[in-house]
Image: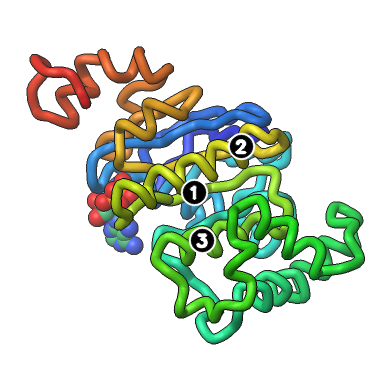
Amino acid sequence: MLRVENIRKAFGGVVATNDLTMHFPKDSLTAVIGPNGAGKTTFFNQISGALRPDSGRILLEGKDIVGLPPTEIVRLGIGRAFQVSRLFKSMTVEESLRGALLSPLGKSLRMTGRFPLKETRDRAYEVMDQLGLTQSANIISGNLSHGDQKLLDMALALVLQPKVLLLDEPVAGMGPEEREQMIETVFALWKKGGLTLILIEHDMEIVFRISQHIYVLSYGRLLAQGTADEVRHNPQVIEAYLGTPKEEVA
Ligand SMILES: Nc1ncnc2c1ncn2[C@@H]1O[C@H](COP(=O)(O)OP(=O)(O)OP(=O)(O)O)[C@@H](O)[C@H]1O
Protein backbone atom coordinates (compact mmCIF):
# COMPACT_ATOMS: atom_id res chain seq x y z
CA MET A 1 0.00 0.00 0.00
CA LEU A 2 2.64 2.49 1.15
CA ARG A 3 6.36 2.18 0.66
CA VAL A 4 9.05 4.68 1.50
CA GLU A 5 12.40 4.24 -0.19
CA ASN A 6 15.59 5.83 1.09
CA ILE A 7 13.97 9.00 2.35
CA ARG A 8 16.33 11.53 3.78
CA LYS A 9 15.62 14.88 5.39
CA ALA A 10 18.22 17.08 7.01
CA PHE A 11 17.81 20.31 8.97
CA GLY A 12 21.20 21.96 8.76
CA GLY A 13 23.59 19.45 10.28
CA VAL A 14 20.87 17.27 11.81
CA VAL A 15 19.78 14.38 9.63
CA ALA A 16 16.25 13.82 10.93
CA THR A 17 15.49 10.87 8.65
CA ASN A 18 18.51 9.15 7.21
CA ASP A 19 17.91 6.86 4.26
CA LEU A 20 14.77 5.25 5.65
CA THR A 21 13.17 2.41 3.73
CA MET A 22 9.95 0.94 5.09
CA HIS A 23 6.91 -0.90 3.84
CA PHE A 24 3.34 -0.71 5.10
CA PRO A 25 1.25 -3.49 3.54
CA LYS A 26 -2.43 -2.99 2.81
CA ASP A 27 -4.60 -3.25 5.93
CA SER A 28 -1.63 -3.61 8.28
CA LEU A 29 -1.15 -1.99 11.68
CA THR A 30 2.41 -0.76 12.08
CA ALA A 31 4.03 1.30 14.82
CA VAL A 32 6.97 3.63 14.37
CA ILE A 33 8.79 4.13 17.64
CA GLY A 34 12.03 5.65 18.85
CA PRO A 35 13.44 7.90 21.57
CA ASN A 36 12.80 11.66 21.50
CA GLY A 37 14.29 13.27 18.43
CA ALA A 38 14.55 9.95 16.54
CA GLY A 39 12.79 11.41 13.49
CA LYS A 40 9.26 10.03 13.86
CA THR A 41 7.41 13.31 13.35
CA THR A 42 9.68 14.27 10.47
CA PHE A 43 8.87 10.90 8.91
CA PHE A 44 5.10 11.57 9.18
CA ASN A 45 5.57 15.12 7.88
CA GLN A 46 7.16 13.76 4.74
CA ILE A 47 4.42 11.22 4.12
CA SER A 48 1.69 13.82 4.58
CA GLY A 49 3.51 16.30 2.33
CA ALA A 50 4.13 18.88 5.07
CA LEU A 51 7.85 18.42 4.38
CA ARG A 52 9.53 17.40 1.19
CA PRO A 53 12.30 14.79 1.51
CA ASP A 54 15.74 15.87 0.28
CA SER A 55 15.87 12.58 -1.56
CA GLY A 56 14.03 9.27 -1.79
CA ARG A 57 10.59 8.16 -2.89
CA ILE A 58 7.24 7.72 -1.16
CA LEU A 59 5.04 5.34 -3.10
CA LEU A 60 1.31 5.13 -2.44
CA GLU A 61 -0.05 2.17 -4.39
CA GLY A 62 2.97 2.52 -6.67
CA LYS A 63 2.59 6.25 -7.31
CA ASP A 64 5.35 8.55 -6.08
CA ILE A 65 3.72 11.28 -4.00
CA VAL A 66 6.89 13.27 -3.21
CA GLY A 67 6.40 16.92 -4.05
CA LEU A 68 2.59 16.79 -4.15
CA PRO A 69 0.72 19.34 -2.04
CA PRO A 70 -0.71 18.00 1.25
CA THR A 71 -4.32 18.40 0.03
CA GLU A 72 -3.56 16.26 -3.00
CA ILE A 73 -1.99 13.63 -0.75
CA VAL A 74 -5.16 13.58 1.38
CA ARG A 75 -7.20 13.29 -1.81
CA LEU A 76 -5.12 10.28 -2.85
CA GLY A 77 -5.97 8.58 0.43
CA ILE A 78 -3.55 9.47 3.21
CA GLY A 79 -5.23 10.90 6.30
CA ARG A 80 -3.54 12.22 9.39
CA ALA A 81 -4.65 12.83 12.94
CA PHE A 82 -2.38 15.22 14.76
CA GLN A 83 -0.64 15.00 18.09
CA VAL A 84 -2.11 18.36 18.94
CA SER A 85 -5.74 18.60 17.88
CA ARG A 86 -6.52 21.15 15.20
CA LEU A 87 -10.23 21.49 15.49
CA PHE A 88 -12.90 23.90 14.48
CA LYS A 89 -13.21 24.92 18.13
CA SER A 90 -16.41 26.93 17.86
CA MET A 91 -18.37 24.38 15.82
CA THR A 92 -20.15 21.32 17.14
CA VAL A 93 -18.77 17.87 16.47
CA GLU A 94 -21.33 17.20 13.75
CA GLU A 95 -20.76 20.61 12.14
CA SER A 96 -17.01 20.06 12.13
CA LEU A 97 -17.32 16.74 10.35
CA ARG A 98 -19.83 18.05 7.85
CA GLY A 99 -17.59 21.06 7.35
CA ALA A 100 -14.71 18.75 6.44
CA LEU A 101 -16.94 16.99 3.90
CA LEU A 102 -18.20 20.25 2.43
CA SER A 103 -14.70 21.69 2.09
CA PRO A 104 -13.34 21.74 -1.47
CA LEU A 105 -11.33 18.63 -0.66
CA GLY A 106 -14.35 16.72 0.69
CA LYS A 107 -16.38 17.79 -2.30
CA SER A 108 -13.78 16.65 -4.76
CA LEU A 109 -13.61 13.26 -3.04
CA ARG A 110 -17.35 12.87 -3.32
CA MET A 111 -17.31 13.84 -6.94
CA THR A 112 -14.57 11.39 -7.84
CA GLY A 113 -16.81 8.64 -6.48
CA ARG A 114 -14.40 7.43 -3.81
CA PHE A 115 -16.86 8.95 -1.44
CA PRO A 116 -20.21 8.07 -2.94
CA LEU A 117 -22.52 9.27 -0.15
CA LYS A 118 -24.88 12.02 -1.10
CA GLU A 119 -25.64 13.04 2.43
CA THR A 120 -22.82 14.48 4.47
CA ARG A 121 -24.90 13.99 7.59
CA ASP A 122 -24.99 10.20 7.11
CA ARG A 123 -21.25 10.04 6.69
CA ALA A 124 -20.66 12.28 9.72
CA TYR A 125 -22.85 10.01 11.88
CA GLU A 126 -21.24 6.87 10.51
CA VAL A 127 -17.83 8.08 11.66
CA MET A 128 -19.17 9.38 14.99
CA ASP A 129 -20.67 5.92 15.59
CA GLN A 130 -17.40 4.21 14.79
CA LEU A 131 -15.51 6.34 17.26
CA GLY A 132 -18.14 6.56 20.00
CA LEU A 133 -18.75 10.27 19.44
CA THR A 134 -22.45 10.16 18.58
CA GLN A 135 -23.54 11.39 22.00
CA SER A 136 -21.27 14.39 21.54
CA ALA A 137 -22.65 15.34 18.13
CA ASN A 138 -24.06 18.65 19.38
CA ILE A 139 -21.25 19.61 21.71
CA ILE A 140 -19.03 22.53 20.74
CA SER A 141 -15.66 21.01 19.81
CA GLY A 142 -13.71 23.34 22.08
CA ASN A 143 -15.71 22.07 25.07
CA LEU A 144 -14.97 18.39 24.54
CA SER A 145 -12.77 16.44 26.95
CA HIS A 146 -9.17 15.96 25.88
CA GLY A 147 -9.90 12.36 24.85
CA ASP A 148 -12.94 13.31 22.78
CA GLN A 149 -10.98 16.10 21.07
CA LYS A 150 -8.46 13.50 20.00
CA LEU A 151 -11.28 11.29 18.76
CA LEU A 152 -12.73 14.19 16.78
CA ASP A 153 -9.30 14.87 15.36
CA MET A 154 -9.22 11.26 14.17
CA ALA A 155 -12.80 11.52 12.93
CA LEU A 156 -11.88 14.53 10.80
CA ALA A 157 -9.26 12.43 9.05
CA LEU A 158 -11.52 9.37 8.81
CA VAL A 159 -14.56 11.12 7.43
CA LEU A 160 -12.72 11.55 4.12
CA GLN A 161 -12.27 7.76 3.91
CA PRO A 162 -8.49 7.48 3.85
CA LYS A 163 -6.77 4.29 2.76
CA VAL A 164 -3.84 5.03 5.08
CA LEU A 165 -4.29 6.71 8.45
CA LEU A 166 -1.34 8.28 10.28
CA LEU A 167 -1.90 8.51 14.03
CA ASP A 168 0.49 10.66 16.00
CA GLU A 169 0.54 9.67 19.67
CA PRO A 170 -3.18 8.98 20.07
CA VAL A 171 -3.01 8.45 23.84
CA ALA A 172 -0.66 11.33 24.70
CA GLY A 173 -1.79 13.23 27.78
CA MET A 174 -4.52 10.73 28.73
CA GLY A 175 -5.21 9.01 32.04
CA PRO A 176 -5.20 5.20 32.23
CA GLU A 177 -8.94 4.76 31.62
CA GLU A 178 -9.18 7.17 28.70
CA ARG A 179 -6.04 5.61 27.26
CA GLU A 180 -7.55 2.09 27.36
CA GLN A 181 -10.73 3.33 25.70
CA MET A 182 -8.83 5.12 22.97
CA ILE A 183 -6.73 2.05 22.19
CA GLU A 184 -9.81 -0.16 22.05
CA THR A 185 -11.44 2.31 19.66
CA VAL A 186 -8.38 2.51 17.42
CA PHE A 187 -7.96 -1.25 17.41
CA ALA A 188 -11.64 -1.86 16.62
CA LEU A 189 -11.47 0.66 13.80
CA TRP A 190 -8.50 -1.12 12.29
CA LYS A 191 -9.98 -4.60 12.87
CA LYS A 192 -13.00 -3.67 10.82
CA GLY A 193 -10.68 -3.71 7.80
CA GLY A 194 -9.94 -1.48 4.87
CA LEU A 195 -7.50 0.78 6.69
CA THR A 196 -3.72 0.72 6.72
CA LEU A 197 -2.78 2.20 10.05
CA ILE A 198 0.57 3.73 10.99
CA LEU A 199 1.03 4.75 14.58
CA ILE A 200 3.64 6.85 16.35
CA GLU A 201 3.39 6.09 20.04
CA HIS A 202 5.61 6.45 23.08
CA ASP A 203 3.66 4.01 25.23
CA MET A 204 5.51 0.74 24.65
CA GLU A 205 2.94 -1.43 26.36
CA ILE A 206 0.35 -0.27 23.83
CA VAL A 207 2.70 -0.56 20.87
CA PHE A 208 3.68 -4.10 21.78
CA ARG A 209 0.07 -5.07 22.40
CA ILE A 210 -1.51 -3.97 19.13
CA SER A 211 1.14 -3.68 16.40
CA GLN A 212 1.71 -6.32 13.78
CA HIS A 213 5.05 -4.83 12.86
CA ILE A 214 7.25 -2.24 14.54
CA TYR A 215 9.94 0.00 13.08
CA VAL A 216 12.39 1.48 15.56
CA LEU A 217 14.15 4.73 14.69
CA SER A 218 17.15 6.19 16.41
CA TYR A 219 18.91 9.38 15.33
CA GLY A 220 17.06 9.28 12.01
CA ARG A 221 18.11 5.76 11.14
CA LEU A 222 16.23 2.49 11.15
CA LEU A 223 17.64 0.73 14.18
CA ALA A 224 15.47 -2.39 14.17
CA GLN A 225 12.20 -3.79 12.92
CA GLY A 226 10.05 -6.82 13.56
CA THR A 227 7.22 -8.15 15.67
CA ALA A 228 6.69 -7.00 19.25
CA ASP A 229 8.67 -9.96 20.59
CA GLU A 230 11.53 -9.42 18.19
CA VAL A 231 11.79 -5.74 18.96
CA ARG A 232 11.33 -6.11 22.71
CA HIS A 233 14.28 -8.46 22.97
CA ASN A 234 16.54 -6.69 20.48
CA PRO A 235 19.71 -5.62 22.36
CA GLN A 236 20.17 -2.52 20.14
CA VAL A 237 16.64 -1.36 20.93
CA ILE A 238 17.15 -1.92 24.63
CA GLU A 239 20.35 0.06 24.49
CA ALA A 240 18.77 2.93 22.55
CA TYR A 241 15.99 3.25 25.11
CA LEU A 242 17.76 2.48 28.33
CA GLY A 243 21.37 3.12 27.51
CA THR A 244 22.25 -0.39 28.63
CA PRO A 245 21.89 -3.69 26.81
CA LYS A 246 21.40 -5.59 30.08
CA GLU A 247 17.74 -4.94 30.70
CA GLU A 248 14.75 -5.45 28.50
CA VAL A 249 12.41 -2.75 27.23
CA ALA A 250 9.14 -2.60 29.17
N1 LIG B 1 11.88 22.15 11.53
C1 LIG B 1 13.02 21.70 12.07
N2 LIG B 1 14.12 22.46 12.07
C2 LIG B 1 15.27 22.02 12.63
N3 LIG B 1 15.42 20.80 13.20
C3 LIG B 1 14.35 20.01 13.24
C4 LIG B 1 13.08 20.40 12.68
N4 LIG B 1 12.20 19.39 12.87
C5 LIG B 1 12.87 18.42 13.50
N5 LIG B 1 14.15 18.77 13.73
C6 LIG B 1 15.20 17.94 14.36
O1 LIG B 1 15.18 16.68 13.73
C7 LIG B 1 15.35 15.63 14.69
C8 LIG B 1 14.13 14.70 14.62
O2 LIG B 1 12.98 15.38 15.14
P1 LIG B 1 11.52 14.76 15.16
O3 LIG B 1 10.61 15.77 15.74
O4 LIG B 1 11.20 14.21 13.84
O5 LIG B 1 11.71 13.55 16.19
P2 LIG B 1 10.62 12.68 16.97
O6 LIG B 1 11.12 11.28 16.92
O7 LIG B 1 9.29 12.95 16.43
O8 LIG B 1 10.74 13.25 18.43
P3 LIG B 1 9.62 13.32 19.63
O9 LIG B 1 9.39 11.92 20.06
O10 LIG B 1 10.34 14.12 20.67
O11 LIG B 1 8.41 13.99 19.06
C9 LIG B 1 15.53 16.31 16.03
O12 LIG B 1 16.91 16.41 16.27
C10 LIG B 1 14.90 17.67 15.84
O13 LIG B 1 15.50 18.63 16.69
Q: Toward which corner of the image does residue 159 lie, by quadrant?
A: bottom right
Judging by the rendered image, the residue that carries numbered circle 1 is 167
Q: CA distance from mark 3 to mark 2?
A: 25 Å
- Residue 56 position within the rendered picture, expressed as x and y whole percent measured from the top left: 52, 39
Q: Is residue 192 left or right of residue 109?
A: left
Question: Sequence order check: which comes first, mark 2 or mark 1?
Answer: 1
* Residue denoted by label 2: 190
- Report if residue 53 is visible in the image: no
Q: Is residue 146 left or right of residue 63?
A: left
Which circle's residue, 3 or 2, is located before the other in the chain? Answer: 3
The 10 Å Cα crowd at callout 2, few under 14, some 14 to 19, many 20 or more, is some
Instruction: Determine the secondary structure under disc 3.
Output: loop
Is the CB atom of the residue marked by disc 1 within 8 angstroms of ligand 1's nearest atom?
Answer: no
Q: Is mark 3 within 8 Å of ligand 1?
A: no
Report how far apart the C-alphas of labels 2 and 1 lie in the structure: 12 Å
Quarter in which the N terminus is drawn: top right
Q: Nearer the viewer, mark 3 or mark 2?
A: 2
Q: Nearer the viewer, residue 159 or 37?
A: 159
User: In the rendered image, which residue does mark 3 sit on?
Assistant: 50
**Amino acid type of the residue tagged 1 in the rendering:** Leu
Q: Toward which corner of the image does residue 15 lie, by quadrant?
A: top left
Q: Is residue 22 visible?
A: yes
